[in-house]
Image (cartoon, rainbow, N blue to C red):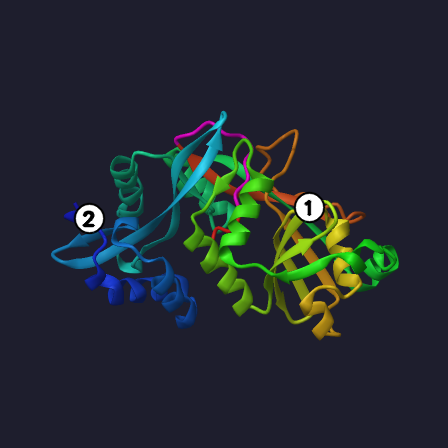
Amino acid sequence: MIYDTVQYGDKKYIPELKRLWKACFEDEDSYIDAFFAAMYADENVLLAQKNGMLMGASFFLPGRIFLSGQWQEIRYVYALAVYKQYRGQNIAHHLLQEASKVFCVPLLTEPANEGLAERFYAPYGFSDSFYLTYDKISLKQAQAMYQHEHWTQQAHVEPADAATYYQLREQHFQGQGYVSWPENHIAFAIDQHRANGGDALVITGSVRNDLLLYTAEGTQVTITETTLPFQDVAALFSNRRIPYAMNHKTYDLLEMKSGIVRAEQPSIRAMELQPETNHYQQLLGMSYGIDLAQGYLNLTLD
């Protein structure tokens, strides 16, 4: 056997876990440090070792999924990593197998690409369960179509704290296949969006409160999650009711990601682009241990 132990995490291994993360994913040190400061817990990580040397590891972040009218605990596979010199020895598969035994709950994952989904996760028993739709519109188009949406003038916009975001998210999204994250997970996701030029907002109207979570880079704004329909988001940006829109004159593209797809053929993996509507969909996530064709998986710290 290429490794001799798989064990829970230990804080003494944090420096080595950070080196493994950096070697495999090449993320910025600031993100790695922020993740460990906010999210690390010994019981949420499994390590594969031989003679005391770390060979691979994976985080299994806790969450809940709503199925058949009740909540069920899940673990989200995050930052599954094996040092390059040890790959091809089934270490990653054994980490997943051990996770199934020690946590005894369904596993969810968001493969980095289609090839990984087909070559690695599918043979292990993971099935397609979560999809994303994308919608895009230029600022010019949004202004032409939605600039006269007068409701945006009365809407109250303010930053959301993690507790408020968590509560409103639960109210709006709970339903079959909805994945809920604990408040510390929500807080970390919000912090990362704000560190990437975006924000988490509560939009207060005359009838209900809505959520809007986004990042901004260069001239593009990406909506990660919202309870508003796309045309309402476009109206808020075109009427400059969103902080980023008020402070920048250069953004020209809105892209909105929606975490659930009501597709007739959910097994289709290929991205389906419809240029006339700038609307397309693709596989987002997979599950192991549950029977679910379509669910809502978002805020996965991708």
- Above or below: residue 114 compared with residue 142: above
Could you give the CA–CA distance between mark 2 and mark 1, rounded to whole angstroms?
47 Å
Name the amino acid type tagged 2: Gln
Q: Is residue 85 left or right of residue 190?
A: left
Q: Secondary structure at mark 2?
A: strand
Give the residue displayed 52% in from the left and 60% down from the top: 190
Which label number is shown at residue 282? none
Q: Residue at 65% across / 47% down in the picture?
A: 227
The residue under the point 18% across, 53% down is: 49
Please identify, in this view, whether the residue under mark 2 or under mark 1 is nearer the observer: 1
What are the residue bounds of the magenta stretch? 289-297
Q: How many marks?
A: 2
Question: Quick one: 265 or 70, which is closer to the camera?
Answer: 70
Tell me the quarter of the picture where residue 132 sits. top right
- Residue assigned mark 1: 208
Q: Which residue in the structure is indicated by mark 2?
A: 7
* Residue 278 in view (yes/no): no
Q: Position of residue 112 (x, y in %)?
A: 48, 51
- Asked if the magenta segment contains residue 296, the reply would be yes
Q: Quadrant of the N terminus?
A: top left
Residue 74 is left or right of residue 138, and the answer is left
- Toward the left, the furthest residue is 51
Based on the displayed image, in which of its 4 quarters is residue 15 positioned? Answer: bottom left
Residue 82: percent from left, percent from top: 30, 55
Residue at image x 41%, y 33%?
72
